[in-house]
Amino acid sequence: MNAEARLRECLARIEAREGEVRAFVHLDVEGALAQARALDAGPVRGPLHGLPLGVKDIFDTHDMPTAMGSPLYAGHRPRADAAAVALCRAAGAVVVGKTVTTEFANMTAGITRNPLNPAHTPGGSSSGSAAAVADGMLPLALGTQTAGSIIRPAAYCGVVGIKPSFGRVPRAGVKANAESMDTVGGFGRTVAEAALLASVLTGDARLREWTVPDSLRIGLVPGPDWAHADADVAACWAQAVRALAPRAARCEDAVLPPGFADVAEVQAAIQAAETAQALAFEHRRHRAALSDALLALLDRGRAVDAETLAAHRARAERWRREVDALFERHDVLLTPSTGGEAPEGLRFTGDPLFCRPWSLLGLPCVHLPFARGTRGLPVGLQLVGRHGEDHRLLAAAQWCMDRLG
Amino acid sequence: MNAEARLRECLARIEAREGEVRAFVHLDVEGALAQARALDAGPVRGPLHGLPLGVKDIFDTHDMPTAMGSPLYAGHRPRADAAAVALCRAAGAVVVGKTVTTEFANMTAGITRNPLNPAHTPGGSSSGSAAAVADGMLPLALGTQTAGSIIRPAAYCGVVGIKPSFGRVPRAGVKANAESMDTVGGFGRTVAEAALLASVLTGDARLREWTVPDSLRIGLVPGPDWAHADADVAACWAQAVRALAPRAARCEDAVLPPGFADVAEVQAAIQAAETAQALAFEHRRHRAALSDALLALLDRGRAVDAETLAAHRARAERWRREVDALFERHDVLLTPSTGGEAPEGLRFTGDPLFCRPWSLLGLPCVHLPFARGTRGLPVGLQLVGRHGEDHRLLAAAQWCMDRLG
C-alpha cells in the first residue's frame, strides 16, 4: 500500500472515531496528505516510510502548534521540530497530528478517553498517542516517560509501548520534566512496529534487525509493590508464568537489592525535585496558570533539600549497579505494568507505581498487551531489559508475545 | 551598593568597551534597569540579588531574542525562559543581555574578541559570557560546556569558570548538543562569586556555604595529552605545584585508568554522534544554513555506527567508575585547562582537548585563573572534583586560589 492510501485509511478511522476518543489536539490533514504524496513520489526514505505517526504535544513541531497540555502555551508555534520528530520524518514517517498530553506530561488529565471504554481513562501522560494507536487511528505514535507515561497508557489501552534505555534518544525540543529520567519512546500495535520506531529514535538499526531467540532466561519481579496489584493483574501474571515458564531456559524470582521497597518513593522525590527545577519559569512566574495538582508537585519538589536529594541519588546509583548485575542471570525481568485495568473516569490517569522503579534506573521497558481484565479492559505486563540492550529486550518481547498472544 | 547603581557601573563599562570586545548579541538596558529598580524596591530575593548577569545566547529568554549563533534562529523569540535563567532571576539576578555563542555552541566562532588582546580569540563556545566577565562588564554570566565550552574560555579570558556535576542543573530551554555531556554552568571573577551562581543553578546551598579546608589531597593529572601543553602551561603547572605541594596533605600523580589515552577521542566520537541526533532538524532540513565545520561534524556523527557508539559508551562508563575511585585517595584532581594562551585570530576558538575527559566523565570542574603566558594572556589550570561534590570542589578551588593568587 502506498503512503497516501495508508494515510487515508487512518484519516477515515480518525474521522469515524475522534469524536468519541479525542486523541488529538491538532490534526494536519492537508499537511499529512502532502507529506504522503511527496513520499509516494520519491525513493524509500527509511524504516518508517509512509507510516502515519502521532506526536505527543510536548514535542516541538515547526509546522503545528505545541501547547503542552497547558493554557500557558496555547497557540505556541515552535521554530523547529524536536529532534525525535525530525528523525522520524527523515525516516519517512508522515506526521498526522499532535496528540493529547496531560499538563506538561504530569498528572492533570487531558480530554482523551479510553477507546475500549470511553468512561475510562486511557492513562497518561502520553494519553492521545496510546489511544490513537489502540483505536487503529495510527500505526505509531510518540510518547515520553518520566515515571510511567508510556508503559501505563500502553497497558490501559492494550498496545505495545516502548521506553528505550535512558540517554539513547535525543530530547532536544521536548518539554523537560525530570532531567535524569525523561525518556522519549512510543507506541505500536505490534512489537515489530514499535521496534521500527525505536530503531529510528535511537539511530540503532539493531533494534529492528534482531531475531527471536530460541529461549529466554526470565527473572520474575512481582516487585515491592505487588500488594497494589489487583486480581486482574494476578490472573494475568499467572497466565504469563504458565505460558512462558515451561518454554524458558530459566524462569524464577529475581533477587532484588536491599532497600528496593523504597524505590518508588525515591523515584517520586527525585522526579518532584527535578521537575520543580525544569519548570522553574512556569512555577515562579505563572503559578495562576498551573493546575493545583502540578503546583503541589512543584512546591513539594522545591522543598526537597539538597542533602536528601543527594542521598536519594546515591541510593538510585547503587540500585542501578545492583540491578544491572541481575542481568548476568536473567535476560529480562518480567514485572507488572499497572495495578489493574484503566480506572473509571477521565480525571485520574492512573498510578505509575509499577513503572517508577525502571524509570528511576533508566532501563528499557516494553509493555506486552496480552490479556483482558474483569471489566473487559486490557491488562498485561512489562518486560525490562539491561541498559543499552534494547535490541535484546525487543527480541525477548517478541519471544514472549509469540507464546502469550 | 543597590542593584541599580551596580547595574549602572556595568552599563558604563559595557558602553566603554563593547565596541572592542563585542560580547553581546543583544542588550536590554531598559529592561535591566526596570529589573534593578524592582529589586531595589523589594525584599532580598536570593543569593544573586542585584547581580547583573549575562546569558549565553543558546538559553531561551522570554523577553529577548535567542539566535543560538545561527542565521536559522535570527530574531527567534522563545515563549519562556530557560529553567536556569528563571532560577537566576528568581534568586535576584538582573539579566542584562544575551552573550555571543559560537554556532549552536559548536566550533564556528562568533564575533567576540579577547578583552585582554582583541587580536586573540576569547575561546568558545561561551565566548561572550567569558569575555564580558573578564572585562568587568558583568560580575556573572551563564555558559554551557559539552567538550570545553566553559573551562576553555575561562582560561583564555582569565576568569573563574565552573562546570557543575553533570545532571545537576536543569537544561530545559537550552539548545541541546550532546545529551550525555551538555552541562549548564557559568563564569565569575572570583571563586566565591562563581559559587553563588552555581548554588542557584543547582539549587544546592552547600555550593555557597562551604568553608575553606585546612589542607587538601591533590591528585596531579598532567594527563594523556600533556605533550600538547606548551611552555606557558608547563610553567604555570610548575608554579602551581611549587605553591600547593608544600601546603597540601598530599600532592602526587594520580594513577589514571588503563586506556585513558583514548579518552579525548572517545569523547569526541560520542559528542559528534549525539550532536547529530540533537540537531537532526537543522541537519536534515537546513543544511545550507549551517557552517561547513558544523556540517562536517554532523555528517561524521551520523556515520558513527551503533556498535561503535555502544563500545565507546561502555568504556566511558568504566572510566567513570575507575576515576571515581581515585577520589578515595585525592580530594581533587589538578589538570591543565588548555594547551596554552588564547590563540591569535578570531576564527578558531581553541582546542578543547584538555577538557574533553572531564566532560565525558561528567565531573565538576573549576578553572583557576592565576598566571600569565609569554604573550601576556591568561593561563591557569582546572580543578576536577568528584561527581556530586561540587561544594567540596569549590572549597578546594578557594584553598588553591588563596595560595596561587
Image (tube, coloured by chain):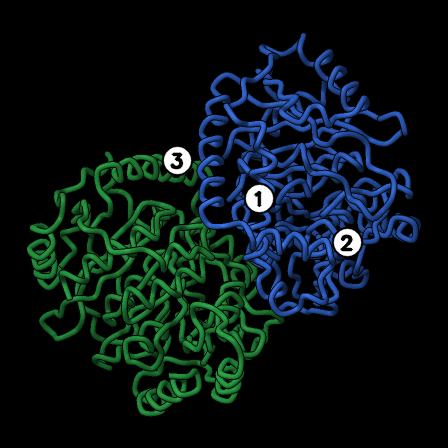
Chain colours: A green, B blue
Q: Chain of mark 1?
A: B
Please state which of residues A40 and B247 is positioned toward the viewer in this rendering: A40
Q: Chain of mark 2?
A: B
Picture quadrant of residue A103: bottom left
Please state which of residues A208 and A329 is positioned toward the viewer in this rendering: A208
Q: Local crowd at mark 2 within 10 Å, few (<14), some, or many (≥20)?
A: many
Q: Nearer the viewer, mark 3 or mark 1?
A: 1
Question: At which x and y percent is residue A284?
Answer: 55, 59
- Residue ID for mark 2: B100
Residue at 47%, 88% in the rendered image: A29
Asked if residue B26 is positioned above or below residue A37 in the image, the reply reads above
The secondary element bearing badge 1 is classed as helix
Question: At which x and y percent is residue A270?
Answer: 40, 47
Q: Chain of mark 3?
A: A
Picture quarter with the N terminus of chain A: bottom left
N-terminal of the pair, mark 2 or mark 1, is: 2
- The amino acid sitting under disc 2 is Val
- Residue ID for mark 1: B269
Please state which of residues B200 and A299 is positioned toward the viewer in this rendering: B200
- Residue ID for mark 3: A314
Q: CA distance from mark 3 to mark 2?
A: 37 Å
- The amino acid sitting under disc 3 is Ala
Is residue A59 visible in the rendered image? The answer is no
